[in-house]
Structures are given as C-alpha cells and as structure tokens.
Amino acid sequence: MRNVEIQMVDLKTQYHRLKSEIDEALNKVIENGIFIQGPPVSKFSSELSEYLDCKNVIPCANGTDALQIAMMACGFKPGDEVIVPAFTYVATVEVIALLGLVPIFVDVNENDFNINIEALSESITERTVGIVPVHLFGQCADMDKIMAIADENNLKVIEDTAQAIGSVYFHKNATTQFAGTIGDIGTTSFFPSKNLGCFGDGGALMTNSGDHAKQCRMIANHGQSEKYIHDIIGVNSRLDTLQAALLSVKLKELNDFSKRRQLVADRYDVGLKDISEIITPHRNSYSTHVFHQYTVQIEGGNRDDLKKYLHEKQIPSMIYYPIPVHLQKAYNQYGYKTGQFPIAESLCKKVLSLPIHTEMHTDQQEYIIDNIRSYFK
Ligand SMILES: *Cc1c(COP(=O)(O)O)cnc(C)c1O
C-alpha cells in the first residue's frame, strides 16, 4: 500500500481503468477532425439530459461560464441583487460582480455547509432578483424551502451544481429530482477533479424551461439565432468535441463513481466517529451525498497542526475554503466586515477535506484513518 502515493484525486488510475473505451472515443474525434460542435457534443447533451431527467442540457466551456450564462439568460440587470452563500468557491460570486449585479451574502448551516434558509429569507429586498444556492461538497441545499421562498418573492433560482452532479433531492411530496434540475436553471462543471470530470475545462447548464434553454444556447454562442445573425450580446463558450466524447464514456460510470465515493465516505465515518475533536460530515435526509469532498470539522483549534502532521506522513489534505468570499480582498468594495457571517468564518478555521476519489484502496484509507487516530491519541 505505502508504495502507492495517496492523492486527493487519482485521475490517472481512473483513466487506466477506462482506457480502451476512452482512447477509442477520443481517437474517433481526432480521425473525424470536427473539434468544435461535432456530433459528440449533442450526443453527450442528450445523454446527460436523459440521465438527469431534465428537458434541456446546454454544454459550455466551464462551470464559471455556465453561471454567467445562466444569469444573463435570466435577464438580471446591473444593480440587481443576487443572494449567495458566503461559504463557497469564488466563481459563484465572481460572475455576479462581473455582470454589475450586487452579491448579497448570507451565512450557511454549521452542519451541512449549505445556505441557511432563515438568513436567506431575511436578506430579500425589493431589488433582489435571484438566489444561487450552491450544493456544496456534493449534497443538495434545502431546495423545497428555497423554491417556496423564490415563488413567494418572484425570484429566479440558479443552482450551482458544480460539486453535486448526480446528487438526488427528495421533495416533501415524495418525488425526487436531480440536483441542478429543480430551480430555473442549474449549472455544472466538468473540471477534471469534479465528480464528472473531463480532460480540461468543460461545463453545462440544465433547465426544464424551453425559453431559458433557448436564451442559454444563444448566449453561449455569440448571441446567435442563426449563423451570423446576432440577436443579443453573447459570449463564446463551447464544450470541445473531444471533451464531449470523453464525457459520454464517463457519464455511463457516474453512478459507479458516486457509489465508490460514498463507500470511502462510509469508511471514514466509521473510522473517525469516536474521535471527539472531529465532526464528520452531516448527511441530510432530503438529499443523497455524492461526496465531491469529504470535509470534517476539527474542534479545538488543531486543524492546521493536524494538516501539517498528515503532510509529514505523506497524506495530502485541503482546506476548502480558507477565507469566506465576503472577506476576500477582491470583494471588499461591497463593504462586508469580519463577524457578519460567523458560521462561514468559523468553518474556514475548522474544515479539512480528506482524500476521496473513485480509486481509493481500503489499505490507503486505513493508513489515513490510523494516522488521524494516532494524532488525537
Ligand atoms: C468548480 C466550481 C465552479 C467553477 O467551475 P469551473 O469549471 O472551474 O469554471 C463553480 N462553483 C463551484 C461551487 C465550484 O466548485
């Protein structure tokens, strides 16, 4: 075991497991020579649309573009307020700022790291136009409540599903829907380390609305309704044919990928549960968890020291995220201060994400768990 290097994500071993099918798909694209908008792009879109049981999937260049295109398609105008959790990856907020919209941060739940519903309700004003829940680390935000608030206040909901593709939400009425297909528009990323990752950048939008789909498609392709006819200002954001061909192969494995991640998570839960300084990830009853990250909270202020200790034992770990977005220098123009979102701020000091991926060996994981246990002994 110790001769196998432990990584946060092991894409190389995963590639070798699927190599023959992947190589064949990629070689076919290279032979055909259609690298932009080739047939594999629409093929992958319909496959993902079928998998997610969502009427429209619009591929694009990356998950950040997907968020931007979604906000443009919703018709948000400069000065409009968009509500986002303070504890997220910066991309969610970046596009809000770039479009001249005003990010309104709200705090998150201490247990599941997702947007806090009460704080969300309280932050709505006359200028609010949208909510961007982020299904952080692979588990859905409380969508029934978010959709009810959005309906009541006539707001658009854009689900940032970059970390939660394949996660299932259980509605109160006992129906289920995939993350990203519940709000007006969902967005996702195929960044290599995401749960459905390609060999470079890639992303997609999901929507059950025909109107939103049409707008997103046009915006992603220079605002074009027909070739060289530009009805609106758009962007250039396409998924490469090579990436689409690869993603068709990997999409067939997505359920298996999720299962493998969940098995790793289950083993961590068991191995770490009796350590009083560690809070293992909370699992909500209304969502499955696809464990993009396995993120524990370290009580007692030893997080950075534990990280160093693990590093010395050749065990990588990551801090997602060390600084909440409202306290990042780039966003100080919005005037947020330390202490405004105490949970997001304290999570930044306590969270530690442990290695989790589809290729993890039980003996690698035992080594990680044993070392964490001996640190706290
Ligand atoms: C990765 C990620 C994005 C951005 O996706 P890219 O494809 O890297 O642009 C957006 N939001 C969240 C929550 C992410 O994790």
Image: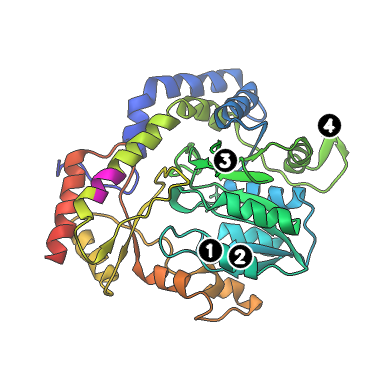
Q: CA distance from mark 1 to mark 3?
A: 22 Å
Q: Label 3: few (<14), some or many (≥20) within 10 Å? A: few
Which label sits on residue 173? 3
The magenta span reads: 265-269
Q: Amino acid at mark 2?
A: Leu
Q: Residue at image x 69%, y 55%?
A: 150
Secondary element under disc 2, as helix, strand or loop, is: helix
Q: Is residue 111 above or below residue 369?
A: below
Q: Amino acid at mark 1?
A: Asn
Residue beneath label 4, please?
227
The question of residue 268 being in magenta is answered with yes
Q: Amino acid at mark 4?
A: Lys
Instruction: Spot the residue most to the front.
Output: 173
Pick the residue in front: 286 or 189.
Answer: 286
Quarter of the rendering containing residue 272: bottom left
Residue beneath label 1, please?
116
Label pair 1/2, CB-CB below 8 angstroms: yes
Q: Is residue 188 left or right of residue 195?
A: right
Which callout, 1 or 3, points at the residue further toward the start of the chain?
Answer: 1
Q: CA distance from mark 4 to mark 1?
A: 44 Å
Which callout, 4 or 1, points at the residue further toward the start of the chain?
Answer: 1
Label pair 3/4, CB-CB below 8 angstroms: no
Secondary element under disc 3, as helix, strand or loop, is: loop
Secondary element under disc 4, as helix, strand or loop, is: loop
Q: Amino acid at mark 3?
A: Asn
Which label sits on residue 341? none
Which callout, 3 or 4, points at the residue further toward the start of the chain?
Answer: 3
